[in-house]
Amino acid sequence: MGEKEAEAVRKVIGSGKLFRYNIGRECERFEKRWAEYLGVRHAALTSSGSTALTAALVGLGVGPGDEVIIPSVTYMATAVAVLAAGAIPVIVDIDDTVTIDPEAVHDAAGKRTKAVIPVHMWGLSCDMDALMKVAKKRNLLVIEDACQAVGGAYEGRMLGSIGHAGAFSFNYYKNISCGEGGALVSDNEKAMRRAGCYIDCCNFYWQGRDPALEHFAAAGARASEVMGAILNVQLGRLPGMIKRMRAEKKKILEGTKKSGLEPIRAASLDYECGTHVMYTLPAPEQADRFADRTGGTVVGKTGRHIYTEWDQVLDHKGAHHPALNPYLLKENAGCRMNYTRDMCAKSLDIADRTVMIATHPEHRAADVKKIITNINDTAAAVLKGASLSAGAEREGSG
């Protein structure tokens, strides 16, 4: 954020027109630019990524009686969005990409399963080719949660544009930001029109009633012209930022090749955001030590990003009133909702042994060199300790 964003906001305030339904102004301009950037037909701004995800589900007709498969490692909003649509989240394992396991999706898909939400966590790309094959075989809708991977791609195709719909977040922690905000995208015009009613139940009033538009009551989740103005500036910076982070990640991976560390398997290294370098250590204890000394973060200690911390979901508190709680709806009586904190042991094992180290578009060559040196030195100490411990164990057992 800088003076360009401040100037854009000043212009909006000076115009006296902060409401988003101003033809050709900031929100509409960003939606057109965002759709073009991703290569999709339609984009709609929302108040948040969570709202965008829910609107995508609603737009595609997901609701009571439906199951939606989600990964065990994602921000809790992925599960909450499914509940907000009236459906039931079915939680499955991740694999060594630290994203949803396509085989787990295949195995979990049942007669009530209507959709799957692959989540491109921490700037990583899911294995979309494998997932789309599973989805086609199992007749599943695919809603990409790209909230943490704004600007990323998979094998040349922009994340969010590969499935039937995509959702993005523009809150403070994302690659581009307007403080809070989000967007959904799709090539499906009917789904987008229905989703538009979820975002704003009066959206067809502002520019004249459209009798062809299905309407229903929904809470407001509109963006403002201030958000649109900031995002239009931010979007100009995005390609360069992604390019620099990808390059930094590759440089770190190359510089730590001989460290003995095991990088996670990348589904699309050349096209992902490159916001994090991740290594999977032999044991949780080594992961903790490695994270402490490198300033990294253990994936399993990221709180709301691990299913075991989703209290509202595990406790079946799916709404503010029992009559609206998806877990209590008769339509969902046959859905799978028996969650336990140890049901995704594979995911917990991977998460507790995996450490992520952030890149940054403002890092200089000296910064990257320092990161590489620190990783190599720490790996030598941590892995040597692991090796000696294992050796002593073998010696003792002999």
Image: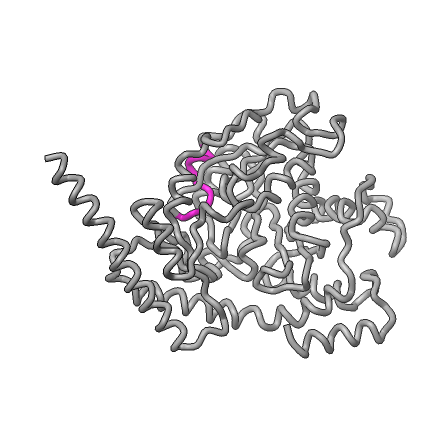
Q: Position of residue 55 (x, y in %)?
A: 70, 45
Q: Position of residue 257 (x, y in %)?
A: 27, 62
Residue 100 falls within the magenta-colored stretch = yes
Q: Judge whether 267 appears above or below 73 on screen.
A: below
**Could you tell me which residue is drawn at 43 percent across and 51 percent down?**
298
**Which stretch is magenta?**
97-106
The quadrant in which residue 367 appears is bottom left
Q: Is residue 131 left or right of residue 145?
A: left
In the rendered image, which quarter contains the C terminus?
Answer: top left
Q: Picture coordinates of residue 95 (x, y %)? A: 40, 42
Q: Is residue 109 left or right of residue 45?
A: left
- What residue lies at 30% left-to-right and 61% top-to-bottom? 378
Is residue 115 placed above or below 299 in the rendered structure? above
Q: Is residue 279 magenta?
A: no
Q: How is this picture coloured?
A: one colour
Quadrant showing the N terminus: bottom right
From the viewer's side, name the closer residue of 67 and 293.
293
Q: Is 365 above or below relative to 379? A: below
